[in-house]
Amino acid sequence: MVAVLKNGVTEKQMENLCTWFESQGLTVHICEGKFQTIIGLIGDTSKVDIELLEGLDIVESVKRISDPFKSANRKFHPDDTIVEVGNVKIGGGNFAMIAGPCSIETPDQIMGIAKAVKEAGAVMLRGGAFKPRTSPYDFQGLKGDGIELLEHAKAATGMPIVTEIMNANHLPMFENVDVIQVGARNMQNFELLKELGKIRKPILLKRGLANTLKELLMSAEYIMAGGNENIILCERGIRTFETYTRNTLDLSAVPMLHELTHLPVVVDPSHATGISRLVKPMAMAAAACGADGIMIEVHNNPSQALCDGAQSLTPEQFKDVAENVMKIREVVQ
C-alpha cells in the first residue's frame, strides 16, 4: 500500500502518521520526490482503513499494491534511483559502460585491459576473480589473488571495480570492491542476498538463466529488505530453445523493468549471445531501448583466454562498440 501526501506536510505531521503506521505492525518506507512525498507500507495492510486514511488532511490518495515486490516497485518510488559508484552514476539518465575480462589471469593482462577500456570510454572495470563454471575441471579463477590484481588496476586507472561473489563467507575479501556482482546462477541464493542486504555497497544483480522479471525483482527485494537499496539490475540473456546463440537476449526486459521498478537496468550482450561479432549490434540495441549501461567482456587475446574467449572483444573492437553506442545514445536522448 502507498499513501501519497499532499504538498506542505510538516515533518511533525509525517512523523505522527509514520508512528501510527508502525503501531499497526507495518514497515514504513518514505520516498520524497521532487513534487510529492510517498509513504510505502510493507506488511499486512488488510486491516488499514483506506477511507480513514484518505480522510486525513495531509493525505492526497491511497493505493493498494498487489505486486509482491514492494521496495523495488516504482509505485513506491516514482523517481529513478541513481546508484553512485565513486564519481560514476548509473540511472536517471546517467549511462555507464562497464568493461573488462571474463576472468582475471595475470597482472599484465588485467592492467593492460583496464587502461585500454578506460581510454575507449569505459567508466568501470569488470573482472572475474571467482568463476562459477559448469565443469569442475574448468578454470575457477584466481580468487583472492584475482581481487588483489583488480585492486591494483583500480589504483592505476582510478576506475571503480566490479567482480562477482560466490559465497557470503568471502565478503571480507570484497572490502575494497566498489560493486559486488551476483551472477545468474546465484540470483536466487537467498541466504547470500540477505547478507548483501546488510551492507551498503552497490550490488549488480544479474537475471537468472530461466527466471522471470518478477523473480528478478523479488531477488532485488531480498537485498532491499535488509536495507541496501543500491541495486543495479542486469539483463544477460535467458535460456530458450534457440541454439545459434548462447542465450536469448531479452531486450524487452529493459523497458518493462523501467515500468515496474525505479532501479537502473544494464545489459550484458557478451553473455547473452556468446559470440563476439554479435556484441556490437546487441550493445547498440541495448542503448536504443533505454538501458542505463552495458557490460562487455574484453580480452587482449581472446583466442588464448582461460574463460569465454569466444564472446570477448579485443580492446580495439571495444573502442568501436563504445563509439557506436554513444552515437545511439545521442539519438535516443
Image (spheres, rainbow, N blue to C red):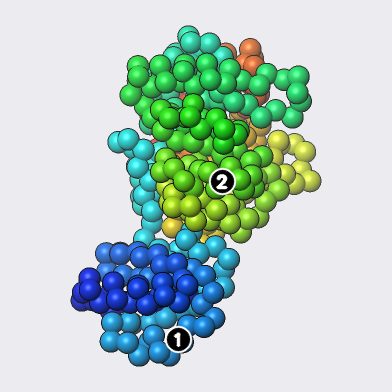
Of residue 244 and residue 16, the one placed in the foreground of this image is 16
Residue at mark 2: 193
Q: Alpha-carbon neighbours of circle 1 within 10 Å: few (<14), some, or many (≥20)?
A: some
Amino acid type at image mark 1: Ile
Q: CA distance from mark 1 to mark 2?
A: 33 Å
Label of residue 50 in the image: 1
**Above/below status of 129 relative to 181:** above
Amino acid type at image mark 2: Leu
In this image, 6 relative to 228: left or right?
left
* Residue 270 position in % (x across, y down): 59, 33
* Residue 254 position in % (x across, y down): 53, 52
The structure residue drawn at horizontal position 36% and vertical position 49%, both measured from the top left corner, is: 82
The structure residue drawn at horizontal position 49% and vertical position 26%, both measured from the top left corner, is: 173
Q: Alpha-carbon neighbours of circle 2 within 10 Å: few (<14), some, or many (≥20)?
A: many
SS at mark 2 in the image: helix
The structure residue drawn at horizontal position 44% and vertical position 57%, both measured from the top left corner, is: 262
Of residue 60 and residue 274, the one placed in the foreground of this image is 60
